[in-house]
Every structure is written in structure tokens, then in C-alpha cells.
Image (cartoon, rainbow, N blue to C red):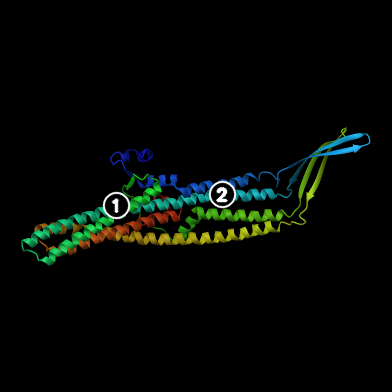
Amino acid sequence: MLVTLLVVGALQTSAPADTLVIPVDDAVRRVLAVNPMVAAATGAVRGPRGLRAETWWPFPENPTLEYGRVRRRTGAGTTYDREWALTQEVEIVGQWAWRRNAATALVRSAEALVDDARRIVALEARRAYATLAVAERRAALTDSAAAFAQRLAAFARQQFEAGEVNRLEWNAAVLEAARARSAAERAQAGAAIAAADLGRLLALPGDSTPRTTSLPAIPPLQWASDSLLLAFARARRPDLRASEALRRSADRNVTAARLSFIPNLTLSAFEGREDGTDRLLGFAVGLRIPLFHRQQGSIGAAEAGRAAAHAELAATERAVQSDVLAAGARFLRARAAERRFATDVLRAATENVTLTERALSEGEVSLTDVLVLRTAAVNAQLEYLDVLRDAFAAWFELAAALAIEPSDLVALLGTGD
């Protein structure tokens, strides 16, 4: 619990001990800090970094140190010959440099995958936050509707006992009260499920429940053409950078593998004593000739890796294009639907909720009219929450498709209002 309290600071002072009230940006930062996918991607960078560390020298293998001792028997007695030899293979046409460039590209690819993991996880966190925020509003709305329906059922009973309404109208009020309370219970369960999902992402202990604050307003974004979105995405998407770096690495691996067909130089230095008296010191130069093993396997594996890398790059480019076009179209339609609901449907529905209560208390409408009008108004408000959730999801998905923070989309694209 102490770690949770430190995350939100003063925000926690007015909340119960088991409730974490956290803004969306703080939630995203915490999720990125504790998410296993990001941690795994960060750890995966160590592999190519270690591979690159082995390519700083033009030596394909470690040096070989040998010691030899020979016993010599002559008529004069027995003597021993001793020899030390140090041998090192050296690449003379730059294979090591190509392997180092390939490993460096692999490091760049792994680092880009870390950024891509953060992009994906941030989108998941924002979606979960928006889902919880809408679920909380749905739970509050349905609970208020259920409370009114129960009051209406009690009022209908009084009216029935007074002979002012018939049993059909009373039963309709009772049915509406039961249905409304059932809807409220389901909405509470939905909010609990959404809170558990966000709590999983936040790595909260089991005795803590996250709660949301107000979400930012969805900006009225507008752009000249989809080509502009695609250009932004191609310049920013980390998964595309990772695939391009992987392709560069595969190309360099093919070059390094083909150069390995050229013989390597072997250098040897030796020192020894012969017959216990003569001291020997020498140097040898040789070539490691690819006669029986001609690197066919290495070249074939490198070419296969290159083909796979080029195919993956093409697939990633298509996926990025699909993501961007789909996200752009969804955002424009989802925000337009949300604005239409907010300006027309939601306003009228909110007014009807208030007016039906007032009209019933003043006796201006019948019990049946109140049930019909209020049910329609509440249903419209609930539908607006679905539309609002979709609009937030579309906003967050567009930002993720362009690999940018949602709050920075206005500066990048501009507004249409």
C-alpha cells in the first residue's frame, strides 16, 4: 500500500485506504514502469549488445596456446625438447566489420521494439482507463435510474391503493423498478471488472481498487489527406524502425557470410628449447583454406534470414498502413457521433429525465408516460456512454498508430473546428 500512496500523493488523502484515485497520465506512466512486456523487451536488448561486443576485433576465434614436450634418448643420455606456440586466425577482408554492422543494426531493432512495446502498453492502459471511467459513469447513472424507478413504484402503489391507477400501470412500475435495479447491479459488476483490469495493468495489490478522474476533452482533429497520416506514421512508428533495422542486419550478415569464403590468415609465434641447450624462437604465417567446408550452410542461413527480414518489413509496412487508415477513419466517425450525441441527443435526454420527474410530481403526465419517457431518456444516456467510450478509444488508437502522445495530436495535425 505504501508504494501506491506514493504514486498519487495528495490525490489519495480524500479517498478510502483501499481506493487509488489516479489521473490517466499517471496511470500510463505507472503501467509503463511495471509492465512485463516492456520489461521483457528491455531485457531482450542485451542479446544483440552482447553479440556486438564479440565483433570488435578481426578474430573469428580465440587464440590457441599450445605446449609440447618431447623426450629424446641418445647414446649420451635422455634429454627433453619443449615448445610453446601461440596461434591466431585473422580475417583479412573485413568480415568482422560486416558482422559488427549487422549486430549494431540488431541492437537498433531491439531498442525500437522497446519503444513499440511502450506504445502498445500505453494504448492498452489508456483503453482500460477510459473503459473504467465510462463504467463508473454508467454505474452511477443506472443506480440513479434504479433509485427513481423504486420511488416511482412506491408512488404507483399509493396511486393504486387510492384507486387512481389500475393494476396494469402499477405492475409496469414494479417491473421497471426491478429491471432498473438489475441493470444497476450489472453496471456495478462491469465497473468492478474494469477496475480489476486496470488494477492488473497498474500491478496494484489485491486490497486496492483504482478510480478515475475526469478524462481530457477529445480534440477536433482534422488533416488534409490520409497520405499525411501515413507519412507521419512511417517516420515515427517504432515497429517499422525495428523491421528496417532487422532488414539491414540481415543484408550485412549475407555479405559477411559470403566474405567468409575467402581464406583467413593464421599467425603463429613459437618458442622452445631443443636438446636442453638450443633455444628456438620463430614465427609462422598460414592460410585457413575453405576446401571441405565452404560456408554453404552459413551463406544459406544468412540468405534465408535476409528473405525473412525483407518479408517481415513488407508485412510491417502494410500493417502500419492498415492501422493508420483504420484509426483515422474511426476517429473521424467516432468523434462526429459523440458530438452529435452530446449536442442533440444527450441534451434532450437529460432534459427529459428532469422534466419527467417534475411533471410527475405536478400531476401533468400519467404514470405510463413517465415510464416510457424516462426509460427512453435513460437509454439514450447509456448509449451516449458507449459512443463516448468508442470516441476515446478511437482517439487513443489514432495516437498509437502515429506513435505520439494523444495530447500532442493537435500540434501535429491541427484542428478542424
How far across and how far down the image is residue 239, in percent? Answer: 51, 54
Q: Is residue 75 left or right of residue 66?
A: right
In the rendered image, the quadrant that contains the C terminus is bottom left
How far across and how far down the image is residue 122, in percent? Answer: 42, 50
- Give the number of the disc on residue 108: 2
Q: Is residue 77 left or right of residue 165?
A: right
Kindly identify the residue that appears in the image at 16 percent across and 61 percent down: 174
Q: Label 1 belongs to which residue? A: 136
Q: Who comes first in sequence, dot 2 or dot 1? A: 2
Q: Amino acid at mark 1?
A: Glu
Quarter holding residue 250: bottom right
Q: How many marks?
A: 2
Kindly identify the residue that appears in the image at 71 percent across and 44 percent down: 62
Q: Residue furthest right?
A: 75
Q: Is residue 339 left or right of residue 287?
A: left
Residue 280 is at least partly visible in this image = no
